[in-house]
Amino acid sequence: MAWKSYNPEQAAARFDCAKDFTVGIEEEFQILDPESLALADRFEELQEKARRRIGESVRGELIASEIEICTGICGSMDEAGQDLRAKRRAVFESAAELGMLLGATGTHPFADWKEQRIIDTPHYRAIDRQLRYCAWRNVTFGMHVHIGIRGRERMIAVFNAMRRHLPALLALSANSPFAEDRYTYLHSTRTQLFTRWFPRCGIPCQIDNWDGYTELVDTLFTTGSISEPTQIWWSVRPHPVMATLETRICDCQSSVEDTLAIASLIMAVVARLAADYDEGGLQPAANANEIEENLWRAIRHGLDGNLVDFEAKKEVPAREAVRRLIEYSALQQRQLGLAKYINRVNFILENGNGAQRQIRAYNESGEFSLLSLSEIARSQLEVKQAADFPCGEGCA
């Protein structure tokens, strides 16, 4: 029972030997023309230049107007933050030298999916052949957070429990209210586009144990549904190569400080769930239908809306749901040195996330037009360049 170049026994061994609560972060950026702010399909030349600075940490992600950076697997959030800032700086500097800008929101406000080009690699050529229209429509940009968890069954238990918290994390990270030259009235248009177009996506169902996971992956592989386990694009998933639990629910963040804040909350919650498992107090996995209801609410209203507390049978403001996660994981925040990053989560709750900032800028413009959307994108880029490039608050 082999999965491409590795097998489930090797994956199980990786998890059983994994180090707890390592962290890795991936970010997907928009490559932009500096004058029009339209997406520019210049991935190959930007990758070539950026790799001279940061090597294989920069890579492609489906379309030629997108570029991804990834940290190493880091022992702490401080280490991950230093790595992420350095790699952001490297790719932004490389883009500037080539006459490009980079955008960092979950969707581009006015890009036409029909004008995008799939990058020419074996992996993405295969996805293009398999998914066709569903792949073509995917002009989205996210952030992914990998947290190390020791023990295959422990990881599956935390995976099951983590599903419950994905809507609150999405509400916190929502940063994509515009797409295809429209105000969509969704706070995370990226999530709606990606999870409703791609297969094996969105909130996964509960998995009984490690054997159940390996049986599913093996069946999908042997029936030709996938060619590698990472073609299961769930919003949280085991990563059998890295031996991490990968949370994939979040929009790309305009500020590196917001990225690190959200990643820190994810890290703390995962660590708390693992502690609950170790102590025999992990809550039963939530009902998939209940999670889906809250996912829709987070997509639609983000931090401006309410989520449902199904146990209490009442609505709870999304901000309060995030604050509950902060309280729930307070001990782990102290143990893992995350307090200063969680302070930034509180700042987001008080001052607004990316979607709220974009919507405020749109409302202040007084009209919907290509120009107003361009100015929203431009202002975000200027804020990013002032704060994060070449250096800024918290810059190493």
Image (cartoon, rainbow, N blue to C red):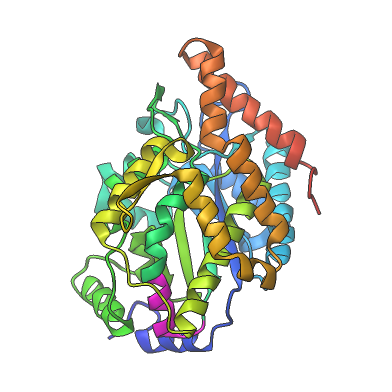
Q: Quadrant of the N terminus?
A: bottom left
Instruction: Give the left or right position of residue 218, taking residue 247 as reference.
Output: left
Rendered location of residue 125, percent (x, y): 35, 53
Is 357 within the magenta?
no
Residue projecting furthest to the top: 366
Name the magenta segment's main secondary structure: helix
Q: Quadrant of the C terminus?
A: bottom right
Residue 107 x %, y %: 46, 36
- Residue at image location 48% in from the left, 32% down from the top: 108
Question: How far from the left and from the top, in percent, is residue 171?
Answer: 46, 45
Q: Nearer the viewer, residue 134 or 173?
A: 173
Can residue 253 be seen here? The reply is yes
Q: Is residue 156 magenta?
A: yes
- For the point 56% across and 38% down, the residue is 353
Q: Nearer the viewer, residue 338 or 316?
A: 316
Q: Quadrant of residue 298?
A: top left
Range drawn in magenta: 150-159
What residue do we see at 30% from left, 77% from top?
Answer: 213
Compared with residue 40, is residue 295 higher up or lower down, i.e. above or below?
Answer: below
Q: Is residue 58 visible?
A: no
* Total numbered circles: 0
Residue at 45%, 48% (x, y): give it: 170
Q: Is residue 297 above or below residue 265?
A: above
Q: Position of residue 63 (x, y in %)?
A: 44, 44
The answer to whether 25 appears left or right of 86 in the picture is left
Is 158 placed left or right of 290 in the picture?
A: right
